[in-house]
Amino acid sequence: MRVIELRLQNNDENYVKMLRYKLAYISKDIVNISEEGASLHVHIEGDKFEEIEAALKRLVDELDDSYTGITSDILYEKQSQNTFPDYDIYQALVDQKWIVPYESGLIGFGREFLELFKLLDQMFVNWGKRFGAVEYVYPDLIGIETLNQYHYIEQFPNHLMFASHLREDLDLIQSFSEKVSAGCDCYDTTYIDKPQLMNKLAICPHVYKQYENQTIDLDEMLVVTSVGKCKRYESINMTKVERLLDFTMREIVLVGSYEHVIKAREECIRLAINFIDQLGLEANIKSANDPFFTTKYSPKAMLQQKLKLKYELNLLLPYNNKELSVGSFNYHGTYFTEAFNINSSSGANVHTGCIAFGLERFAYAILSQLGVDGAKFWMERQAETLLFS
């Protein structure tokens, strides 16, 4: 194994985060990225060292040219007075069978982890009910054409998980079965049909598709809440429960006037702050931007930060002293209503927003701060009061 050291000329937190995020997609021969002081160490296996080294340089040059360096606006910050666990929380959860690891980015979970997961989800459902949210269940798959309506694929191509099937051909299907039985690695386009569907990457696009070409009354905000499995490929960035390939997202989707959407977003931020304060967690809420993959969308990232279109709720992970985004509070303007032709009866613009929480990582971050016993105590003694007050 060989290692390339990238000396960071820019120590800005968001810059380093974006660089690490993109490095993973350069080559499957990159097996690890570690941070040591003011350097990133990229660990490489295989015989493509020079090729990868050149690609690393191109990536750093592109990021240096496009990075805007806008400082995040910290809306809320909380220091915890709790004593953090002094043991490996991930291993403890595995040992107690609260979580079950499978392939990279895949976990199962049960017992108290599942209990905490459900409590958090019910709390977010209750938040949605404050705004009259109607609950829906949506498919785990979404049409590629739908994703292209709002340009998702070109903005985040690295995340895509295609869904397909064997081509309708009896001889081909029989051949495939026989070759797989003989040990052939035949999972390619010789047999697999061109995909028309994708594993969904978020909840809200199904909501906007649901109301496509419809006219709504802006006197009352349309609010939908839904929970579902989402899938995003993140290469070697997938680790423990922090970043999963297959994860569960609860969203509260807002469609209405600018005033209604912004007011609801502000109320959800207030509810999140109240929850964090009552648990005494170490956290912050600050402006952020989506991790657009191509430099073409750097201006859009800058706009998100500058106009504070996206705020993220981050919880500290004490074992590595890094923060983990567990939720976001998003205002989209008229971006989605234009893409899906959602109009108002008055002719005024229709605005959207969504409040989104990653349930596994939220539960994991709480456990990382409270520990196994602390989380048990909270769930047994305090959860009902906090969640349903």
Image (cartoon, rainbow, N blue to C red):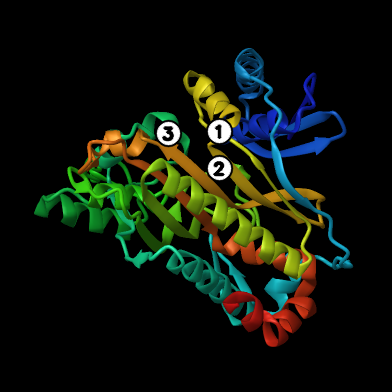
Q: Are marks 1 and 2 in contact (CB under 8 Å)?
A: yes
* Residue in view at x 57 percent, y 70 percent: 120
Q: Secondary structure at mark 2?
A: helix
- Vertical placement of 160 versus 361: above or below? above
Q: Is residue 333 visible?
A: yes
Quickly name the residue at label 3.
157
Q: Quick one: label 1 or label 2, which is nearer the N terminus?
A: 1
Q: Are marks 2 and 3 in contact (CB under 8 Å)?
A: no
Q: Quick one: label 2 or label 3, which is nearer the N terminus?
A: 3
- x, y percent for residue 344: 24, 42
- x, y percent for residue 224: 36, 60
Quickly name the residue at label 2.
235
Q: Residue 318 falls in which quadrant of the image?
A: bottom right
Q: Quadrant of the C terminus?
A: bottom right
Q: Secondary structure at mark 3?
A: helix
* Residue in view at x 55 percent, y 42 percent: 235
Q: Residue 35 falls in which quadrant of the image?
A: top right
Q: Quick one: label 1 or label 3, which is nearer the N terminus?
A: 1
Q: Residue 7 falls in which quadrant of the image?
A: top right
Give neighbour class at mark 1: few <14, some 14-19, many 20+ (Cα, 10 Å).
Answer: some
Q: Is residue 252 left or right of residue 334?
A: right
How far is mark 1 from mark 3, CA to CA?
11 Å
How far is mark 1 from mark 2, CA to CA?
7 Å
Query: Relative to the observer, which residue lies in front, 174 or 152?
Result: 152
Q: Is residue 141 left or right of residue 49?
A: left
Quickly name the residue at label 1.
25
How far is mark 2 from mark 3, CA to CA?
13 Å
* Residue in view at x 77 percent, y 31 percent: 40
The amino acid sitting under disc 2 is Ser
Circle 1 or circle 3, nearest the eye:
3
Q: Is residue 99 left or right of residue 215?
A: right
